[in-house]
Image: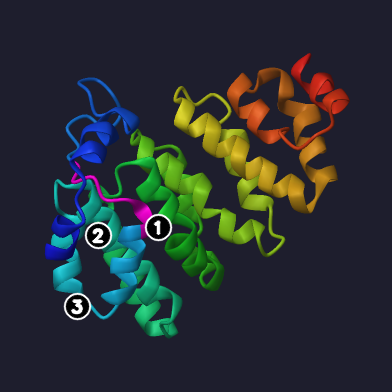
Amino acid sequence: MQELARAANPEKAAFFPRFFKTSPGEYAEGDQFLGVTVPEQRRIAKKHRELPLPEISKLVSSPIHEHRLTGFLVLTEKFRKADEDTRARLFTFCRKHLAGINNWDLVDTVAPKIFGEHLIAHPELRKMLHTFAGDTSLWKRRIAIISTQAFIRRGDFEDTLTLAERLLRDPHDLIHKAVGWMLREVGDRDRARLEEFLERHAAEMPRTMLRYAIEKFSPERRRHFMER
């Protein structure tokens, strides 16, 4: 997209590969960057919310990170204002383009706003998240837990807690952080449910996951769980 090219910043383009872990063996190996900030991408996405799906497909299939993120930001703009039939088509489009959702910022953009929102309307499809939680793909596992943010915001914690329990032994810190974050979101709405979960699982939780989950606790309660 020409607007993204015009907004490119060489200094940021040099910094982003280190920030997003693109070196050999890292989780985003080979990802390419223009150096466009997220606020600028959001501005461009809102301007082009009427972009047709074939053009969005080109963006989200691009090797350039900002192309993909802007493409998915356009999709979230479309989804937010769409009727139910259109939302179903956009959800299907996202599922067909999962390969492009391959970094944490892309997951965190799409998962709650498209996957989560659609699964609220179609709870019979939520089993997809539990399938994703067992996938070898780091990004599918992160989609699984982050999608539940949409449920949490409506006071529905069951899928979050079930998935969190399943992901306790996940080897990757990006999952530890995501699970801890969603547990903290549960605690913001129902501290008792979070503490019940922690009383059962704190001893086996990765420390990063636990620290994220108890971030808003008092120092005394944090010590209580960290010493388990």
User: Which label sits on residue 164?
Assistant: none
3 vs 2, front mark: 3
- Distance, label 3 to label 2, CA atoms, is 16 Å
Query: Identity of the amino acid at label 2?
Result: Lys
Residue 35 colored in magenta in the image: yes
- Is disc 1 placed on a helix, strand or loop? helix
Q: Position of residue 48 (x, y in %)?
A: 26, 75
Q: Image point 81% across, 28% down: which residue?
A: 199
Whether tag 3 and tag 2 are in contact, CB under 8 A, the answer is no
User: Which label sits on residue 96?
Assistant: 2
Q: Image point 51% across, 67% down: which residue?
A: 117
Q: Position of residue 114 (x, y in %)?
A: 43, 64
| Colouring method of the image | rainbow
Q: Quadrant of the N terminus?
A: bottom left
Q: Is residue 107 above or below residue 48?
A: above
Q: Is residue 140 above or below residue 14?
A: below
- Distance, label 1 to label 2, CA atoms, is 13 Å
Query: Identity of the amino acid at label 1?
Result: Val
- Is disc 2 placed on a helix, strand or loop? helix
Mainly helix, strand or loop, the magenta region?
Answer: loop
Is residue 184 shown left or right of residue 67? right
Residue found farthest to the top:
227
Q: Sequence-wise, which precedes: disc 1 or disc 2?
A: 2
Q: Sequence-wise, which precedes: disc 3 or disc 2?
A: 3
User: Which label sits on residue 110?
Assistant: 1
Is residue 206 shown left or right of residue 135? right
User: Which label sits on residue 52?
Assistant: 3
Q: Image point 26% across, 81% down: which residue?
A: 50
Give the magenta range: 33-39
Q: Is residue 175 above or below residue 146?
A: above
Residue 101 colored in magenta in the image: no
